[in-house]
Image: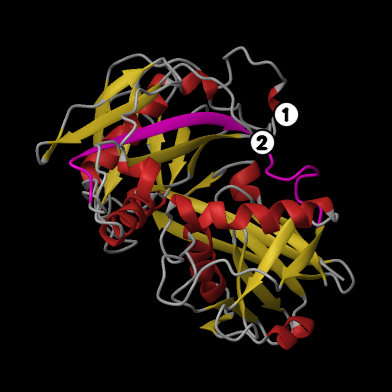
Amino acid sequence: MYTRLLANCYQNTFHSYRYQSAKLASYSTSQHCRRYPFSLLHFKFQKTSTNMKLSATLLLSALASASAFLAAPGNLAFTTASTSSRDSSLSVTVETKPLGIPGTAELDKPWKELGFEFRPTKSNLRVTYKNGQWGEPELCESEFISLHMGATALHYGQACFEGLKAFTHEDGSVHVFRPSENAKRLQSSCERTLMPVVPHDVFLNAVNEVVRDNIEYVPPYGTGGSLYLRPLLFGSGPRIGLQPADEYTFIIMVIPVGDYYKGGLEPVDGVIITDFDRAAPRGVGNVKVAGNYAADMLPNMRSKEQGFPIGLYLDAATQTCVEEFSTSNFVGIDSVNKKYVTPKSSSVLPSITNKSLMTIAEDEGFTVEARDIPIEEMDTFDEVLAFGTAVVFFPFWSGY
């Protein structure tokens, strides 16, 4: 028994739009600019055995949901809005620098056959923090970096990263999904690891510039692909004693990607990992630091060797409650009682995708429960899903 998730918002991007009344938005009269002050996000669950469906829509304010890049007729429209309310006012800045056309880059594979792997693009963006201040962003074509052998990232794991995606819409415009939320989460990671916080405007401007420069590498509409952005911050200054670096490097690399797992949204077998822990209580499981993923490599590879593409971790203290998948948040769906259940733990990384879908579920009349989930309760769910930027929405069957 499983639920097929029709993730229109990611496979076909934000394909529907709703204009608000004049009192909520102001528009430029330029004939070259088409802007969508609000994006309508769609998804649907479908339980095949009973044909029960959960279809939902969520109205997300422009910057809180997506930043828009208009790729045709050659101008760029970058929309911003207050994140305090869905009904916030909108301001629009129009730039006249010509852009390319999404999906026109030459790749080694057809757009529909892309997996989730590194692939070279036109450029990456870099900003250096030195002498207590952030420098100017630079677009670099080289895939390599020059790093001091004493860098704190190498010795003490002072590194954190983010993941977000840009999608091409049917009209040729390109939208980045909720970059403001990634900026906030990166700031949290910085604070936990004593790295300088990347200012909100620096992060958003960097996202803007690197997508603009690599617009041809955004997969075309209808291919199911996206441009994956990987912001990375690490200590590049040398320290031999245990202390924060005096220099940091912020990079955003971009990669055109397809499905994280082969088969798209086809369900896969999952395994519950009981002989390893993902994160310790009061540790760094709730921030996106590099070391969290290093700890998962051994159990992750062992699980895959046994035929399980995805692993589920339990809480480290008692091994009785569900916490998180290797790369994604856990969500259980109870369609009969209309419940959307996800773990509440200080060791779980807050997922922006999960956060968005919690709002959708509430709008559709589902009760959202963020709480401890005993392992025995998994049998009561109609479906168990993994949610995250890389995997998007992923159904699976459980195994032991």
* Residue 67: quarter of image: top left
Residue linked to disc 2: 258
Above or below — where is 357 with respect to 60?
below
- Inspect this view and state whether residue 255 appears: yes
Q: Residue at x 72, y 79 (%)?
A: 335
Residue at left offset 43%, top offset 55%: 288
Q: Quadrant of residue 367?
A: bottom right
1 and 2 marks in contact (CB < 8 Å): yes
The quadrant in which the C terminus is found is bottom right
- Looking at marks 1 and 2 on the same chain, the residue that comes earlier in the sequence is marked by 1
| Residue 122 pos. (x, y %) | 46, 16
Residue 270 location, x and y as percent? 78, 63
Disc 1 marks which amino acid?
Lys
Q: At 33% from the left edge and 53% from the top edge, which residue is drawn?
A: 21
Q: Which mark is residue 112?
A: 1
Please report the bounds of the magenta region as a residue range.
244-267
Q: How far apart, in angstroms, are the residues tagged by discs 1 and 2?
A: 7 Å
Q: Where the N terminus falls, by quadrant?
A: bottom right
Q: Is residue 23 in view from this perspective? A: no
Q: Position of residue 350 (x, y in %)?
A: 46, 65
> Toward the viewer: 224 or 117?
117
Q: Secondary structure at mark 1?
A: helix
Query: What colour-coding does the image apply?
Result: secondary structure
On screen, 397 above or below 241?
Answer: below
In front here: 136 or 54?
Answer: 136
